[in-house]
Image (tube, rainbow, N blue to C red):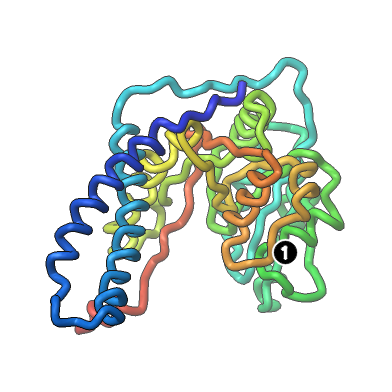
């Protein structure tokens, strides 16, 4: 059931971009002073290159957003008959344990699920809070703490998967992520029926305890997920955003785990694609993530 890829948006993007490049190139050339020597004139012309690379990315995203406004058929992935595959749900935290979020991960309707808390916290108070919650509410949950912080989040995930996880299907949720009760069941259905290496859920911003800053900018999360990502199933590269995802352990193993880089999620999806494995953006499966409550520059402007 994997969707067939099309180069239509790529061709549309390139045709518009080439037109803009030629038009702006002619205009740009007319501004180069004739008095300049050839070296400086060539150097000045090079300034047009990064500008056109910006336009290439902008035009590509523009068409994804515009075309996503039109009605389209959204693939539905019902749970396969007699499907009882075990699932490992990895909840990652580092001094930001959120009880509402972890309870949403634990209280899933899918029965054959194991909650694993990947705790990278430095503060002993955070560790104690996690241990207390597990003892009181989820004695079947597993808490994993590694001996070092190598690789940051990627290292945290790789350590847990290598040492604790035996399940083929793995879900990753961030510390602030709230998922609906049927999240695991729907993600498994999509992963199995679409026959992909990973499934990325759609996200929107949480509305609880929002600051004024978050209330203003939080809608951008929903806009990006609704209008920039859905068409990539058919017309482009489906990215992995590191949370609200399900992936196959066999795929993770084939590419050597999550790359220990800044954007381990995008690196993971890129390595999978290099091996011929793709992901699927499930726009009908929704999770919530917390929008940053503040920024230093915003605090400075507010005080002023």
Q: Residue at x 41, y 51 (%)?
A: 205
Q: Residue at x 34, y 61 (%)?
A: 214
- Residue found at the far top of this picture: 81
Which of the two residues, 64 or 207, is positioned nearer the viewer here? 64
Residue 77 position, x and y percent, is: 58, 22
Quadrant, the C terminus: bottom left
Say if 31 sits above or below 280 in the image: below
Task: Report crowding for label 1: few under 14, some 14 to 19, many 20 or more residues within 10 A (C-alpha).
Answer: many
Quadrant, the N terminus: top right
Total numbered badges shown on the rendered structure: 1
Quarter-wise, where is residue 256 in the image? Answer: bottom right
Element under label 1? helix
Which of the two residues, 149 or 50, is positioned nearer the viewer here? 50
Say if 127 sits above or below 256 in the image: below
Q: Residue at x 33, y 64 (%)?
A: 49
Residue 201 position, x and y percent, is: 53, 40
Which of the two residues, 122 or 155, is positioned nearer the viewer here? 155
Q: Is residue 234 visible?
A: yes
Residue 112 position, x and y percent, is: 77, 34
Say if 122 sits above or below 225 in the image: below
Q: Is residue 109 visible?
A: no
Say if 116 sits above or below 159 in the image: above
Query: Can you identify the residue that label 1 sits on?
Result: 156
Quarter-wise, where is residue 174 in the image? Answer: bottom right
Q: Is residue 4 left or right of residue 16?
A: right
Q: Residue at x 27, y 81 (%)?
A: 40
Residue 7 position, x and y percent, is: 45, 32
């Amino acid at each position: 059931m994997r969707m067939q890829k099309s180069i239509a948006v790529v061709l549309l993007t390139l045709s518009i971009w080439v037109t803009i490049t030629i038009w702006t190139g002619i205009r740009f050339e007319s501004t180069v002073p004739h008095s300049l020597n050839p070296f400086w004139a060539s150097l000045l012309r090079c300034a047009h290159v990064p500008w056109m690379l910006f336009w290439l990315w902008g035009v590509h995203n523009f068409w994804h957003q515009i075309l996503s406004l039109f009605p389209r058929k959204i693939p539905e992935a019902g749970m396969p008959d007699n499907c009882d595959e075990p699932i490992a749900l990895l909840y990652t935290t580092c001094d930001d344990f959120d009880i509402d979020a972890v309870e949403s991960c634990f209280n899933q309707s899918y029965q054959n699920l194991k909650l694993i808390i990947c705790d990278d916290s430095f503060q002993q108070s955070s560790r104690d809070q996690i241990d207390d919650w597990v003892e009181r509410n989820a004695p079947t949950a597993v808490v994993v703490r590694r001996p070092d912080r190598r690789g940051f989040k990627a290292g945290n995930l790789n350590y847990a998967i290598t040492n604790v996880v035996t399940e083929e299907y793995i879900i990753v949720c961030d510390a602030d992520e709230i998922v609906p009760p049927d999240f695991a069941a729907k993600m498994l259905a999509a992963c199995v029926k679409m026959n992909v290496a990973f499934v990325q859920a759609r996200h929107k911003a949480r509305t609880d305890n929002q600051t004024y800053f978050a209330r203003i900018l939080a809608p951008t999360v929903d806009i990006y997920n609704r209008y920039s990502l859905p068409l990539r199933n058919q017309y482009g590269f489906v990215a992995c955003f590191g949370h609200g995802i399900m992936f196959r352990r066999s795929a993770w193993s084939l590419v050597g785990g999550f790359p220990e880089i800044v954007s381990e999620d995008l690196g993971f999806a890129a390595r999978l694609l290099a091996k011929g494995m793709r992901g699927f953006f499930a726009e009908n499966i929704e999770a919530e993530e917390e929008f940053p409550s503040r920024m230093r520059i915003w605090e400075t402007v507010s005080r002023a």
